[in-house]
Amino acid sequence: MRYIYNYAWDKNERSLCKMEMRALFGKESNSSILESPLKVDPSRSPFIRERIEVLCEGETLNGLAGKVRELPAPESAFKVIYVKDPIFIKEDRTGFEERRKAEREIGMNIKGKADLHHPKILYGIKNMNGRWIFGKYVKNEAIWLKHQQKPNSYSTALSTRVARAVVNIAAPDPAEKKVIDPCCGIGTVLVEALSMGIDIVGSDINPLIIPGAKENIKHFNLQGQAEVRDIRCVKGSYDAAIIDLPYNLCSVITPSEQLEMLQSARRFTKRLVIVTVEDVDSVIEQAGFRISDRCVVTKGNFRREVILCV
């Protein structure tokens, strides 16, 4: 099977988007379109707009219609959607009327009943590199947007978009994987991971912040664990860990404390994603990790690094 993913990103998050691509698909795309045999739910990523599961393709729209005509009838009512490129990509100049005409032409050749208002099945068509693509269509539900409206937050916490991407980098294939956020703070990473069905636990040394993390998890009807615990006291082993290193005025830590944190992490995981505003390369190396990938996320003059360590 072949899948087409349509991407969109803010210029400040382009580097993070590409790093997430590499984690999820083992490669990145130079454009807003990525093709892969791997099936990923678009709603996992803050950058994937939609996915087409390719059923057939043709050199012309008429040729595509002929191939669509040969497909089995769908089990339920359907709708055909013309999948556009993001607004900042200028190759796709197809006008509104032309898009509607293409949708009608393909829809008329699908066996079964069309329903423009309450379809059970969505199909997508796309003009890509001079060829027409047709397949099952899935749109990103942008779940992380809902998570912005949580009961507890603070100014230095990761955005829900960044947190979601960081989770995907830490656990690109989360099935039967155990993940930990041992400095979970208000629980932004926990909420994103739990909403994706990932087996994650959280803890933090600050007893004042854990009640807020628990309330955030409960607010979104999620089931997850957040407890007061020093990272040095973490027991067991985890397939991946995520650490947003403390940096604000209330939680300044020294390089030696950073090293102790990362050495502790090395005991319980072999895959670690660090979010930091400081240069911690030497600390990472001293802790026994190797940097596998990295990116920079900016917001105004504020700069964060996301570093994948193995």
Image: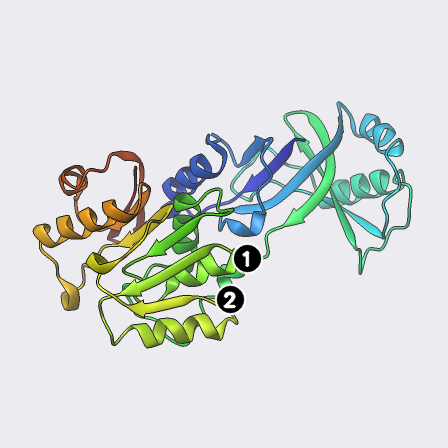
Q: CA distance from mark 1 to mark 2?
A: 8 Å
Q: Identify residue for label 2.
A: 146
Crowd tier of the residue under label 2, counting other residues whose Cα lies within 10 Å: few below 14, some 14–19, many 20 or above: few
Amino acid beneath label 2: Lys
> What's the image's color scheme?
rainbow
Q: Is residue 69 visible?
A: yes
What label does residue 49 carry, if any? none
The residue lying at 63 percent from left, 26 percent from top is 129
Amino acid beneath label 1: Ala
Crowd tier of the residue under label 1, counting other residues whose Cα lies within 10 Å: few below 14, some 14–19, many 20 or above: some
Q: Is residue 250 left or right of residue 140?
A: left
Q: Identify residue for label 1.
A: 142
Q: Is residue 186 visible?
A: no
Q: Secondary structure at mark 1?
A: loop
Q: Residue furthest front?
A: 236
The residue lying at 86 percent from left, 34 percent from top is 71
Residue 247 place in picture, x, y as percent = 18, 59
Residue 235 place in picture, x, y as percent = 28, 56
